[in-house]
Image: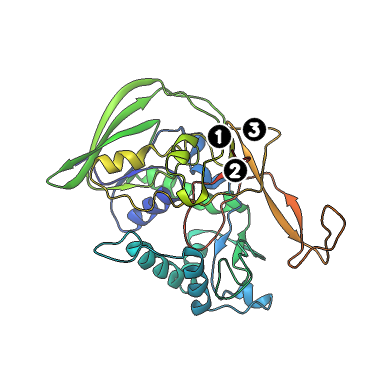
Amino acid sequence: MDTDVIIVGAGLSGLVAAREIHRAGLRAVVIDQEGPQDLGGQAWWSFGGLFLVDSPEQRRLGVRDSFDLAWQDWRGSAAWDRLDGDHPEDEWAERWGRAYVEFAAGEKREWIREAGIELTPVVGWAERGDLTASGHGNSVPRFHVPWGTGTGVIGPFTSAAQAAEAEGRTRLLHRHRCDGILVEDGKAVGVRGSVLAPDSNARGAVSSREVVGDFELRAGAVIVASGGIGGDHELVRKFWPERLGTPPRAMVTGVPAYVDGRMIGIAQQAGARLVNRDRMWHYTEGVRNWNPVWPGHAIRILPGRRRSGSTHWGGACRLPAFRATTRSRPCACCAPGRTSPSTTIRGSS
């Protein structure tokens, strides 16, 4: 074997996995199709809000929260309806969801502090939903904002990976694109792929796909942490939920082009079971970035609270009334329930 564990993807999930593997005394190889300037992936661009339950920051602001309330909110947002039969699609989503809310209500705060993430006193109210305790969304503020926003979240893990690389127990193989997972006797035993030409592109910008070599690595385990499909609008349209009708003709994009969903199909070819591909979380409140980094670069609009508001025709807004503000980075929200490809809809057909 070349290493104990191979991780495909050097974003937040991949680097968190690498840190845990290193802490367990094992060796890891992390491969990614992008260069070292993109270490950390799309999390670097995010607002970095962290989902915590009944935290000191919440209590300081007078927010009453609990595991039971958070789990109720999570289920209300997820609206799992595929739990019947053998191995239903929502089976592991429900199990993972409960485990994560337990983590957020328990050891998560100490875990992120130990990792090096520092929180501001700010607790935002992302994904307010319908503002009830039993419906969609967070019924109380849980969006804990770290110092440095997304960079403050990913920074400690990039530093940990680089330190582990210096120790010789972790290898970071940039510009190594996985093209297939090696399977023997029903087990993933490694990966194969292409070595891409070095590129000095700016972080988040489109990089070259020129192939200059190939590689094969073997390990005792393979972790796929490659992100979603938000950078590929054709994949978004292919798996567009039927309940939402015809996909939009034009969309803007909250993630770099490398969030292309390639590894999802590659994992399926290797025997992985894919579930809920039609479940996506899109935002309608997006605008084009005046100074785009990647194609169709979008900025999500976040609402800011104010005491009163008026509609475009001059009447009073019904509660909740919020003023719209903008920020310079796309959103990575702490929404409960389903994850999304982070594509923002600009128009409909």
Image quarter of the C terminus: top right
Q: Which of the labelled discs sits on residue 296, or is there none?
A: none
Q: Which of the labelled discs sits on residue 292, or is there none?
A: 3
User: In the image, what residue type sits under mark 2?
Assistant: Ile
Spot occupied by residue 184 in the image (x, y as percentages of width and height): 14, 43
Q: Which residue is mark 1?
A: 203
Q: Nearer the viewer, residue 135 or 210?
A: 135
User: In the image, what residue type sits under mark 1?
Assistant: Arg
Spot occupied by residue 14 in the image (x, y as percentages of width and height): 40, 48
Q: Nearer the viewer, residue 93 or 85?
A: 85
Distance between the alpha carbons at the discs numbered 2 and 3:
17 Å
Nearest to the eye among marks 1 and 2: give it.
Answer: 2
Residue displayed at 27% across by 29% down: 215
Colour scheme in the image?
Answer: rainbow
Nearest to the eye among marks 1 and 3: give it.
Answer: 3
Relative to 47, does residue 173 appear above or below in the rendering? above
Q: Which residue is mark 2?
A: 345
User: In the image, what residue type sits under mark 3?
Assistant: Pro
- As drawn, the residue found furthest toward the right would be 314
